[in-house]
Amino acid sequence: MKEVTLEIDGKVVRAKEGMTILQAAKEAGIEIPTLCYHEEMEPYGVCRICVVEIERGGRSRTVASCCYPVEEGLKVRTRTPKIERVRKTILELAAITAGEDVGGEVRALAFQYGANLSRFVSLGLVEPSKCILCGLCVRRCIEAQWDNAIDFVGRGVGRRVALMPGKEEACKTCSYCYRVCPTGRITSFGPNPPFSPP
C-alpha cells in the first residue's frame, strides 16, 4: 500500500494511504483526545473533541481527525490555543445533556482543558442524564446484537438513548455498551438494563 508523508506537531510522520490523521498520530505516539471514537468501530465524527488544525497550500482549517484521511505534505497541529478553546467549549456543551457530575473520560478531559461543566448546564435547557449522545453504545449495540436493542429517540434537546420496546431480553444478555461508554452513564448491565423504554 502506498505511503504518504505528513507533519504532525512538527514531527515527520509516514502513514499508509487511507489512514486517518488520528490513526497516523497514534502510531507516531502523538495523543489526540477522543470520545465517540473506538478503534473497533467505523469512525463517526460526532463529538468533535478530536478536532485538529490542518494546513495545505498556505490555508488552514479545522477537521475531525478521526474521519479526515492523511494526505501527502499535510501539516497538522493538534494542540494550538484555538484547538484548546474548541475542545474546552465542546466539553462545556456536552455537559448540557451530561450534567456537571458526569464521570469517565469526559470528566478527565474537562479537568485537562479547564472546562467549566456548569457553564451551560445552569441554563436548565434539559434534564442532565450523564449522556453526551456520542452514539458509541448505540453503534456497539448494533454490532453486538444486530437488532438495535438500544437506539436514539427524539429530536433536538429531547434526543436521548433508549431501550427499544420488546428488546429487554436482548439487553439483559449483553454488556458491550457498558464497556464503551465514555461518561459513566451506563453503570449496570445484565438483568437491569440502564435505559428506559421510549
Image (cartoon, rainbow, N blue to C red):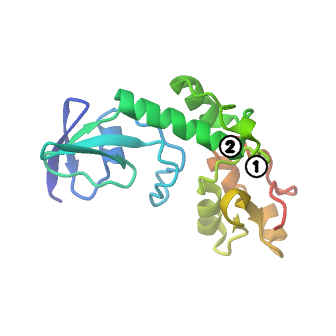
Residue type for callout 2: Ile
Q: Residue at x 33, y 32 (%)?
A: 29
In the displayed structure, 70 sits above or below 104; it is below
Tally the numbered discs: 2
Q: Is residue 70 left or right of residue 183?
A: left
Crowd tier of the residue under label 1, counting other residues whose Cα lies within 10 Å: few below 14, some 14–19, many 20 or above:
some
In the displayed structure, 60 sits above or below 117; it is below
Crowd tier of the residue under label 2, counting other residues whose Cα lies within 10 Å: few below 14, some 14–19, many 20 or above:
many
Task: Measure the alpha-carbon separation of dots 1 and 2.
Answer: 7 Å
Label 2 secondary element: helix
In this rendering, does residue 20 appear at all? yes
Mark 1 / mark 2, whichever is N-terminal: 2
Residue type for callout 1: Val
In the displayed structure, 65 sits above or below 112; it is below
Q: Position of residue 113 (x, y in %)?
A: 51, 26
Q: Position of residue 28 (x, y in %)?
A: 29, 36
The label number, if any, that marks residue 96 in the structure image: 2
In this rendering, does residue 31 appear at all? no
Q: Residue at x 65, y 64 (%)?
A: 141
Q: Residue at x 31, y 47 (%)?
A: 21
Label 1 secondary element: loop
Q: Residue at x 78, y 71 (%)?
A: 164
Q: Determine which quarter of the picture holds residue 2.
A: bottom left
Q: List the residue tagged with mark 1.
A: 126
Q: Position of residue 144 (x, y in %)?
A: 63, 65
Q: Is residue 43 left or right of residue 28?
A: right
The front one of 21 and 191 is: 21
Q: Is residue 5 left or right of residue 103?
A: left
Residue furthest to the front: 123
In the displayed structure, 121 sits above or below 139; it is above
The front one of 159 and 107 is: 159
Q: Determine which quarter of the picture holds residue 76.
A: top left
